Image (tube, helix red, strand yellow):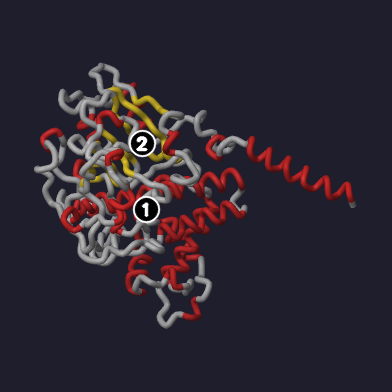
């Protein structure tokens, strides 16, 4: 008995030590993040540049930015302007010189005035977020340099990205030079589509109107060390005057940017997309490393399902109107069913999207999930959209919108349609009107 009592703690301690010595999830053999060759959009562009099949033009004012956006099919209307110094190139960012962020479904581009490099991140179907820098110096052979250490200092942590290489959107209070204000106990969590609108976009310029106030466009009147009490200042802020801004001309020199906008609709999309991209990576990593049926993988997949279905999405509390035309351009990218409906259709009244299933179900990252994981997600989505899963989390959206989403998926996602044809919902007998 005495020996047994001594042995158990030793075994537990040895297990803890062994776990502590394991490499991060991204570097386990099944993923091998830093050693694997990416096949994302940026890697494909670099291959085309090396072959001479593509070319980047250099602009004297903005470097390679316009050409990179064109080559990667990233819309200028997606531009968001962030003035908080919360990036790699802090010396080139300020309220009078914000960093511009552009994105499409799987690429993110960061540009700062007169900065020596441009920051680019792309979603690789296997590896998740892959980070690059591009020197902003004219050359006949521009090269996207992959970064596996420098960028991951911020873009890989349990608190911000779930422990995988990922993306993060933050909302901070910034002083008049753009430095983040903080105090002990401040909530500095990453922004997702579950973050209340009132807590979003601190440190960002935001153009457009919404039904509720937010932290955007707000610059602290002093430097961080000059505030008698940051906590007291933050507690008494009134966002009303800065929340409904449609023109930034009196705040900075807009001629330096490709667009005069920092569109509120684009920023709403950015919060949803970055968080789902991270959850796709987590589900993929856990399934590859721990096994598809492991508790960790099953928990990660269910979390992804809930994000794809907009569970606990923060309400908009009133109509939202952008300024750059991003909303229309985003919706136009389709695909659409035979009734003209798309999962990219926006609501912008009570919620972000018209139909309760994310367009990221079309992404390369989703399609690259292990077959068993993807089929499990399809069954869960089918149960929710048909009403077989009657839990409150999944029935807040009107049944008619869920039915429409199901029809759109069946029409535009062939492998989902094939599985749905063969699969009966868990509680179909509870329906008053069977669907399909």
Q: Is residue 78 left or right of residue 274?
A: left
Q: Which residue is drawn at 17% across and 36% down?
A: 96
Q: What element carries label 1?
A: loop
Residue 211 at x, y = what percent? 21, 63
From the viewer's side, name the closer residue of 349 and 85. Answer: 85
Disc ID at residue 303: none
Picture coordinates of residue 346, whole percent (x, y): 25, 60
Q: Distance between the residues labelled 1 and 2?
A: 18 Å
What residue appears at the point 31 percent right and 48 percent down from the top-left corner? 270
Examine the rendered structure and indicate whether residue 344 appears above or below residue 121: below
Q: Is residue 83 above or below residue 4?
A: above
| Disc 1: which residue | 192
Nearer to the camera, 34 or 388: 34
The quadrant in which the C terminus is found is: bottom left
Q: Which disc, if any, is residue 121?
A: 2
Q: Is residue 101 visible?
A: no
Say whether disc 1 or disc 2 marks the residue closer to the N-terminus.
Answer: 2
Question: Within 10 angstroms of label 2, few (less than 14), some, or many (20 or more) residues?
Answer: many
Point out residue 314 in the picture as x, y percentages from the top left corner. 34, 62
Which sits in the foreground, 426 or 25?
25
Q: Position of residue 356 (x, y in %)?
A: 35, 64
Instruction: Residue at 52%, 53% (x, y): give it.
Output: 300
Asked whether residue 366 is in view, the answer is yes
Front position in the image: 7 or 372: 7
């Amino acid at each position: 008995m005495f020996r047994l009592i001594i042995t158990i703690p030793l075994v537990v301690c040895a297990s803890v030590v062994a776990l502590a010595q394991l490499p991060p999830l991204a570097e386990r053999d099944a993923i091998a993040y830093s050693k694997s060759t990416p096949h994302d959009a940026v890697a494909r562009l670099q291959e085309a540049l090396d072959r001479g099949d593509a070319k980047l033009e250099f602009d004297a004012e903005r470097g390679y930015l316009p050409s990179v956006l064109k080559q990667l099919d990233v819309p200028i209307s997606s531009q968001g302007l962030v003035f908080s110094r919360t990036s790699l190139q802090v010396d080139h960012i300020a309220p009078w010189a914000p960093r511009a962020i552009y994105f499409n479904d799987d690429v993110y581009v960061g540009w700062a005035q007169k900065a020596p490099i441009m920051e680019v991140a792309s979603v690789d179907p296997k590896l998740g977020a892959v980070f690059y820098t591009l020197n902003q110096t004219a050359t006949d052979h521009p090269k996207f340099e992959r970064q596996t250490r420098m960028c991951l200092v911020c873009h890989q942590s349990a608190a911000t990205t779930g422990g995988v290489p990922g993306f993060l959107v933050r909302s901070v209070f910034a002083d008049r030079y753009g430095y983040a204000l903080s105090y002990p106990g401040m909530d500095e969590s990453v922004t997702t589509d579950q973050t209340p609108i009132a807590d979003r976009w601190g440190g960002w310029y935001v153009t457009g109107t919404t039904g509720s106030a937010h932290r955007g466009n707000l610059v602290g009147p002093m430097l961080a060390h000059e505030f008698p009490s940051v906590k007291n200042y933050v507690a008494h802020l009134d966002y009303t005057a800065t929340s409904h801004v449609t023109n930034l001309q009196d705040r900075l020199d807009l001629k330096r940017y490709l667009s005069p906008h920092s569109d509120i609709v684009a920023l709403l999309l950015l919060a949803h997309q970055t968080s789902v991209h991270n959850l796709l990576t987590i589900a993929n990593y856990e399934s590859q490393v721990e096994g598809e049926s492991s508790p960790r993988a099953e928990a990660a997949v269910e979390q992804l399902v809930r994000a794809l279905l907009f569970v606990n999405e923060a309400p908009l509390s009133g109509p939202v109107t952008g300024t750059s035309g991003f909303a229309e351009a985003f919706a136009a990218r389709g695909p659409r069913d035979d009734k003209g409906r798309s999962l990219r259709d926006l609501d912008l009244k009570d919620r972000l999207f018209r139909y309760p299933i994310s367009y990221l179900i079309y992404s390369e990252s989703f399609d690259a999930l292990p077959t068993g994981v993807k089929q499990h997600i399809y069954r869960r989505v089918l149960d929710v959209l048909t009403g077989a899963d009657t839990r409150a989390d999944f029935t807040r959206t009107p049944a008619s919108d869920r039915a429409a989403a199901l029809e759109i998926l069946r029409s535009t996602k062939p492998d989902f349609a094939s599985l749905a044809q063969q699969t009966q919902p868990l509680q179909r007998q509870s329906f008053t009107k069977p669907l399909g």
